Image (spheres, rainbow, N blue to C red):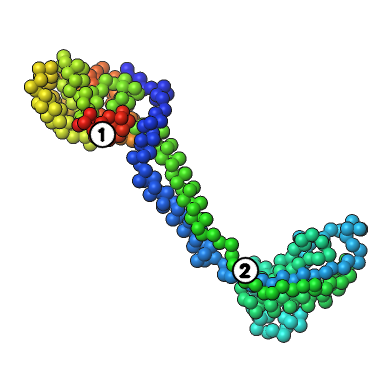
Amino acid sequence: MWEGSYGSEPFDLRLTILRMIRNLGRIVLFALAGTVLFGGGYYVKNVLLGESVKYEQTITCKMEYTNPPVQSGDYYVNDMTWNTYVDSEDFRNMLKKSETFVSSSSFMGDMDGWTEHEEGLTGALNATVASDIHVPSFTVSTPDEGKTELLSRAVQEVLVGEFAESIPEVASIRVMDVSEVAPVKPDVRPMRAFILAAVLSFFFVMVFFLLVEIGADSIWLPATLRRRYGLRTIGTINSPELLENLRYILKEQKSVAVCAVDAEVDVKEVVKALQDKASRAAGDSKVNHLTKDWIAVEGELSDSENTVFLHGADGVLLVVKAGLHSGKPLEYVLEYFATQDIQVSAAILWDADEALIRSYYILPDSQQQ
């Protein structure tokens, strides 16, 4: 009974790095796709479909309290307090009744429309208390320069008039300073977004490929067949040690059944390749016995006819196709062979990445042909 040894198999850093290098093109491609997807999404959302330039004007006021909150301790005034005031329906109604607002009928119509939306009239107002509770600032912001200036005048009128009279804690309000109307562009940084998207995409793609390489039951090296599955391997069809391994491992077998784990592998092609290798070495007395009776076993290995044939063969050469998910199919075949008491004489890694093998073992090109 064969026994897999995934747990005792050490992490092969060299093979993993080589595989990542081989997949570098796909890694870069997926990273570029992620950059375009996330960076492009940011660009579309914040540049093409983002907010237009707004025009702001800041009003700085001087407040006098009937009973200063710092001294009394009965109440407290901060940003939230003033934003609650300017966001209230009472303040909005005061604005609509102001002389500035009423005198601009067309503008008033626009403002009435604003109140029906989530960011209505009060969405154009913001209050801040930088340090001194006696000096709050009110910022008016709209997409139109004229509307900003007009709304600012209405806010000033309400603050120093009806609003100051309606708040018992406020003795008086006067406007200290009004800034110029200035355009404010949205803080959009597409270049930084694309760079961040590229870095994150490359990182996550690398992590994904690394997890795939570590977690997959891949077989890329002939040595994996021995380390993980305990199979004697003759290498690949282009291994320099192929003939010598055949001579030693299959020296007693006259007829060798060649069968493949993967049904897509053309077993006859494997047999022909082995015969060509043997015929080229026929002049060498050490390997002249390689002219064996190579028999291709096609179809399902669990087929009754094939099973009987494998039992009667002198030796069994198992063809394992190199690949990312070659391990589980091989396990399935080995479990069946163990149940049937079919002994695998040797295994060959088919369709292997010869360049990867040369790089892994640091072999010159002449050593792998």
Residue in the image at 43% along x and 44% along y: 205
Q: Quadrant of the N terminus?
A: top left
Does residue 205 appear in the picture of this structure?
yes
**Mark drawn on residue 184:** 2
The relative height of residue 82 versus residue 326 in the rendered view (above or below) is: below
Give how far across and how far down residue 125 sits, in percent: 70, 69
Q: Relative to the observer, which residue lies in front, 156 or 167?
A: 156
Give the residue number, with chain letter if any, for mark 1.
354
Residue in the image at 74% along x and 77% along y: 154
Q: Is residue 217 left or right of residue 253?
A: right
Amino acid at circle 1: Glu
At numbered mark 2, what does the secondary structure look like: helix, strand or loop?
Answer: strand
At label 1, counting other C-alpha atoms closer than 10 Å, the crowd grade (few under 14, some 14-19, many 20 or more) is: some
Residue in the image at 26% along x and 34% along y: 354
Give how far across and how far down residue 100 sits, in percent: 74, 82
Does residue 166 appear in the picture of this structure?
no
User: Alpha carbon of mark 1 to alpha carbon of mark 2: how far?
Assistant: 61 Å
**Mark drawn on residue 113:** none
- Residue furthest to the left in view is 283
The relative height of residue 254 versus residue 171 in the rendered view (above or below) is: above
**Residue 137 position by quadrant:** bottom right
Q: Is residue 234 left or right of residue 57?
A: left
The relative height of residue 152 versus residue 5 in the rendered view (above or below) is: below
**Residue 95 position by quadrant:** bottom right
Q: Relative to the observer, which residue lies in front, 155 or 242?
A: 242
Give how far across and how far down residue 223 sits, in percent: 31, 25
Q: Relative to the observer, which residue lies in front, 241 or 266?
A: 241
At numbered mark 1, what does the secondary structure look like: helix, strand or loop?
Answer: helix
Q: Earlier in the sequence, mark 1 or mark 2?
A: 2
Residue in the image at 38% along x and 49% along y: 29
Give how far across and how far down residue 345 sits, in percent: 22, 19
